[in-house]
Amino acid sequence: MDYLKKNLTQVRSHTYLSNNDPRYCEKYLKFHPHDRQMLYQYAQELFKKGKFTEGVKQLEKSSALGYFQAKRELGHLNQFQSLPNAKQNKTASRYSSLWKWLLALLILSLLLFSFLIVWRYVENRFFIEKNDYYYQFHEYHNPEPPPKDDDLNSVSVPIEKQKETLALLSVENALVRYNEIYGHIPKSLDELTGGAPSNFLTLSHEASVQKDKILIKSKSQDEFSNFNKFELHFYPKANKLILAKISPSGKETILSSYTTASGKGALPFSSSKVSQRVVNPNGGGGVLGTRGLVLQDGYAIHGTNDPTSIGQKVTHGCIRLRSGDMEALYPYISIGTPFMVKSGFPDAPFLKTGLPELAVDSSILKKEESPGTHFTWRN
């Protein structure tokens, strides 16, 4: 009997439990439900069997009864369980922040889209000229329409008549500039149209048909005093070169406007004059383009073989034009034509489509080449 009692636990008078019973803890707690140590042991058994939730309940009962080991283990479990929640909360916070950024980006995109729509409306409504780098406003910047000129009105005058008028103006300018330099009027147009470097003017077909008329007018001092003149104005801020007609009364009319590539720094002079005119400088296939107008100190206005540079400040000082623009402008400009640097932005040009290209014989252009000269402009 004593041997049997060694393997038994008395739970009540005349009632014993076998210590080898697999359900020993469970049965013991039915008789002693507040045994905190047994509650802890029972919780461990449940954990081993994979009954985590039931085990935690027994562990909580043991902890509530003051069993230190149960309290400590329950604390570890609570900390372990809180980690996934923390990560989940952090992930949820991250997703919440991401959605806020996406919403802000969507709102910004809608505002930008609305702005572009309004901008296009304003542009079409208020702007009359647009180029690569600035706009001109006819209701704000240029409130007055371009001046009317019966000889140049591009709407009412045929293009051929317009060319004749502009060619006549180019010859008048050349005569005035020749007189300013030499102090007298040339006896014939041959003095203006010789080969380089004395090529004051490139005589076009449109001008040659009027040369007798021009010479007759130049012999009269009254007529000569009424000749118009040309000037070149450069606007660094706008990267624009314009051709201006100056009337005898001093009234300025902007005839055409060209977007340029210009120097990284400011020009060292505010005014100059065209001192030389060149066709195909250095052969015409390089960085100087096919036409050049020399100013001073190695600075020039010339074409370019890099049209992507137009609109930028990338040269060492020279002013570049697109090849087509430079070839159209060249016959209008004589030696002695003033060049001036202006501030701000120019008004809208009178000729919206630019100067019409004058017809010039290839033999005349050939005479204006300088094959024996190597030009080292600040291109």
Image (cartoon, helix red, strand yellow):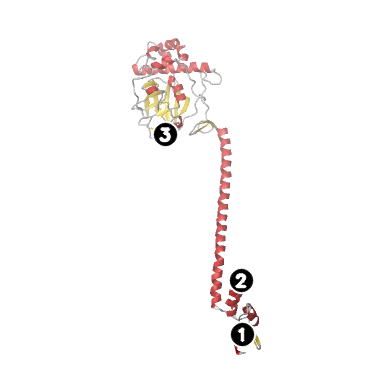
Residue 346 as seen in the image, left or right of residue 195: right
**Distance from Cα at disc 1 to Cα at disc 3:** 103 Å
Q: Amino acid at mark 2?
A: Lys
Q: Secondary structure at mark 2?
A: loop
Q: Quadrant of residue 12?
A: bottom right
Q: Which residue is mark 1?
A: 8
Tell me the quadrant of the picture where the C terminus can be found: top left
Q: Name the side, left or right, on which 369 lies relative to 117.
A: left
Q: In this rendering, does residue 42 appear at all? A: yes
Q: Return the mark for residue 313.
A: 3
Residue 81's tag is none
In depth, the one of 280 and 262 nearer the eye is 280
**Amino acid beneath label 1:** Leu
Residue 323: quadrant of the picture: top left
Which dot, 1 or 3, sits closer to the camera? 1
Please state which amino acid type lies under the numbered disc 3.
Lys
Q: Earlier in the sequence, mark 2 or mark 1?
A: 1
Image disc number at residue 49: 2
